[in-house]
Amino acid sequence: MGTTEKIREIAAGLLREGKVDVVIGYGPGTLPLRSTPLFARTVEEAERLIWDATCGNNLAVYLPGRKDRVGIVVKGCDSRAVVQLIHENQIAREQVFVIGVPCAGIIDGRQVEAAVEREIRAAREEGPELVVEGDGWSRRFNREEVLYGACRVCRHNNPVLYDALAGEPLPSRDGGPTLVEVWEKKPAEERRDFILSEMARCIRCYACRNACPMCYCTECFVDCSTPRWLGRATDAGENLFFQIGRVLHLAGRCVACGACSRACPMHIELGLLLGKMNKDVLELFGHEAGLNPEEPPALNAFRPDDPETFLLGK
Amino acid sequence: MKNPYLPLPMRIEKITVETEDRSLRTFSLSFLNKADAEAFGFVPGQFAEVHVFGQGEAPFGIASSPLVKDRVEFTVNRIPGGIVTTALHNAREGDIVGLRGPLGNGYPVQEFEGKDVVIIGGGFAFTTLRSLTWYILANRERFGKLTVLYGAREPGLLLYKDELAAWQKRDDLELILTVDRGREGWQGKVGVVPAVLKEAAPSAANAYAVVCGPPIMIRFTLPVLQELGFPPERVIMSLEMRMKCGLGMCGRCNIGHKYVCKDGPVFTLAELSELPAEY
Amino acid sequence: MTINAIIVKKERVNDFLNALRAGYRLYAPVAGQAGPVFAPVNGGTGWPWPAGNTLKSAKEVFLPQTEVLFTYRTSPDGVQVEEARVEGRGVLLGVRPCDARSLTMLDKVFAGEGVRDPYYTARRENTVVLGLACNEPGGTCFCTSLGGSPFGTAGCDLLWVDLGDRYLVRVLTERGKALVEGRPEFGPAGDADLAAARELEEGALGRLGTVPVQGVKERLDRLFTDPLWDRVYEKCLGCGTCTYLCPTCHCFDLTDEVVDGVGVRLRTWDACMYPLFTLHASGHNPRPTQKERFRQRIMHKFKYFVDNFRETACVGCGRCVRYCPVNIDIRSVLAQISAGEGGSAQ
């Protein structure tokens, strides 16, 4: 049985037996190379659930604050978000039935569009290939060529938490330098100029923040008026303040799912700042968010050998 | 073209602490420019955006009488965490602020002429009703019987106490004061505004009711007015909304297709019934 | 006005634009990391214009996302207010008919019969709009369903049609005529040019998808409390992407900042999608959840704006469809409303 069928079967069963009030999964999108979140509340609706390489949204974003019982379809990165949300008491373990899906990587539609330089009207996966079509043209890609950069080097593509697995576990990837490793080697001025030019493009739509499962604050620091931490002007300086604030608030919590950078309509390289933050947390505290349902978040726990360079100089 | 975003420069001439808990202050502002004072005319019920320079702007109903030409008054409740209200409460007499106004539509005073007017206010929503009362008193012969019913949670929270005392002595209006919770020395009624209204039972024949107060008071007052026979076209209400431009452009204060800053803040109950219940 | 269609060969376009630069600031679609956006052209002419539509709409040329309205300095004696001035004449180049048409809708809000916004109005008065017809509408375009057209002229002073090696230029207003009259780059359009343009127009119209919007306004008049809203909002993240990219969305915020001792009154875009948008000081929020806020978006564009201005505040540009992070498709929402269906799962 394929993954899609398995997901439908599990979801239909959960709904039929009244074990959950809703199953949050993916349904077919209205655009090529896009799927869309689907909230299935009946067995009929569950029949529309799908799984393919366009299922990029992190559905855990819909969990914080829920009072109902939820079935949720998660990839490896998404499952880490569920673990982290449970750690942070934003959802109870008993509330969620986690339908885990081992993920072979998500196709980056923007890369494909950039490669064909024309409007894509239809797309489909054929085995290891992606076929895209437009007005009077068609082109094939090796799927691996057009995955998100983060997916290509993903080490956590199998769900770390699940109540049912909808596919066979997949080998993890470990190849190639990450974007952060590439940029760390560049001189400071180049990094600064790049980040400022990225920040100049930000339109403060907060798609990044709102797509992130870990950004669930009822009052975000950008909306606080007393004290007013930052202004509303969309210049590079203010935008940088917002992004850095968000990155710092995600320290030890970001699960590197990429939802933020996929949501950003201005294609800002958000993975760079967040990836660097995650790398620092790993080096300083030996911790990655959401991997271990038993282990508390890095910045919520204290070990005697934690580095305290700002206090003790070591 | 006149720039509707530019504030008129004003000076805070007098600050009166209205309530015992000091949460409400009345600011009496004068115009720095004589020409502005001469050009400024408003109808009771209109509001203005008060600009605390360097902090922000907020809308307040105009509390002074339109016949007072050189002063504009606002009564401001200090909201914890509010930039403008906190700044105003920290201001001193002599400080300079900005004013944009008058804005909004005001009470339909022309329609009230020849009719009885029943003014019903609760808490610190009484500000524009004070303006309306003064307006009617200054043009007394144009209007019928004037009844003012004003309630607060406790005596210390009533606004404009000196004026209320003066109004009590007049024979050209009936003033009924009430508090939810009385105390020793309190001479007025004890009871919530809707209950006191029911007891007073003003005649709805040839009368308008003007209601302004917290949502809970409105909720229980409207049925009483209906029972008394006030038709929805003659129940006048003044609404609040979060506002910024005050001009119907920034898009945020709408109820359905109406903007509270431009088509309101005064609406009849009949008009409101046609709009989505989203306020 | 006698001329109404002329021709300019592509090899002469830069000559024309360079001549314009002497008297006008040029705004054109400039390629960017995520897509073309309108920007002042510094050096060069900004031509050729990119295929397809811009990422951000043309509204930011007239209603900038961040705008200083005035500055001020206070003293014990008073306050000195300095109004920001909108200076200079401009030409907006390569704007698609949907965006040009959206300007006529923004005009109703900012430059209507009552109080006018001096900043927006000055920019509109100072800027000539040079539209570019869409020979190849995109897959998410649906302008004709909303009364627009890929060759529409609403809001344009000139409409340029790409005929391959030349443009047909429709001269629509006195202001547009003033730009081109007597210019050596332009010559009369012949029957063949007009026929070529017509054929392209028919082709473009044939490619456009349609969205059933019949009766949407009338249905929305009665649908405020319908259970449809309980489902249709569920995916919505409540970000501002649709609002900020939309050519007809115009909501804004006003704030004060102090920069180096000078007070600044700032106008910045805002969105009804955010929880703070309607939050009262008392803590009461008339739109407490995303359901009410999503409903407001649809109601405003397809009912309230119609109630106030007899026009639908949507030009069918498709940006919200393309860029919504969760693929909420307004075409599907409209189809559901038009067909009288309740909310669906996606």
Image (cartoon, helix red, strand yellow):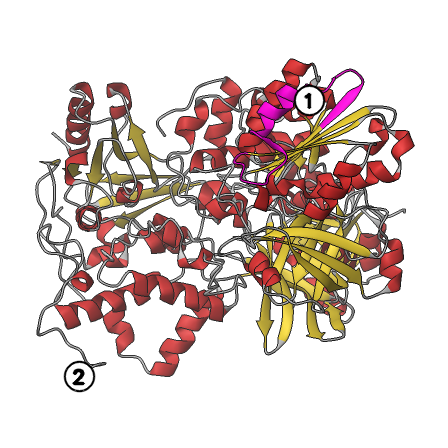
Give the residue type at disc 2: Leu
The residue carrying mark 1 is B270
Please report the bounds of the magenta region as a residue range: B180-209
- Compared to residue A195, the image places residue A130 above or below, namely above
From the top left corner, tell me how far across and down residue B78 is, in percent.
56, 54
Q: Chain of mark 2?
A: A
Residue positioned 41% across, 24% down in the render: C343
Q: Is residue B194 magenta?
A: yes
Q: Is residue A90 left or right of residue A97?
A: right
Q: Could you tell me which secondary element the residue under label 2 belongs to?
A: loop
Quadrant position of residue A55: top left
Locate residue A290 relative to residue B240 in the image: left or right.
Answer: left
> B260 or B98: nearer the eye?
B98
Foreground residue among B16 and A180: B16
Q: On the picture, is C248 further left or further right than B110?
A: left
Q: Which residue is mark 2?
A: A312
| Residue C102 shows up from this direction | yes
Gap between marks 1 and 2, in whole Å? 71 Å
Q: Is residue B233 above or below residue A62?
A: above
- Which residue is the extreme one toward the front? B185
Q: At which x and y percent is residue C340?
A: 49, 17
Q: Secondary structure at mark 1?
A: helix
Q: Identify the subunit bearing mark 1.
A: B
Front position in the image: A146 or A202: A202
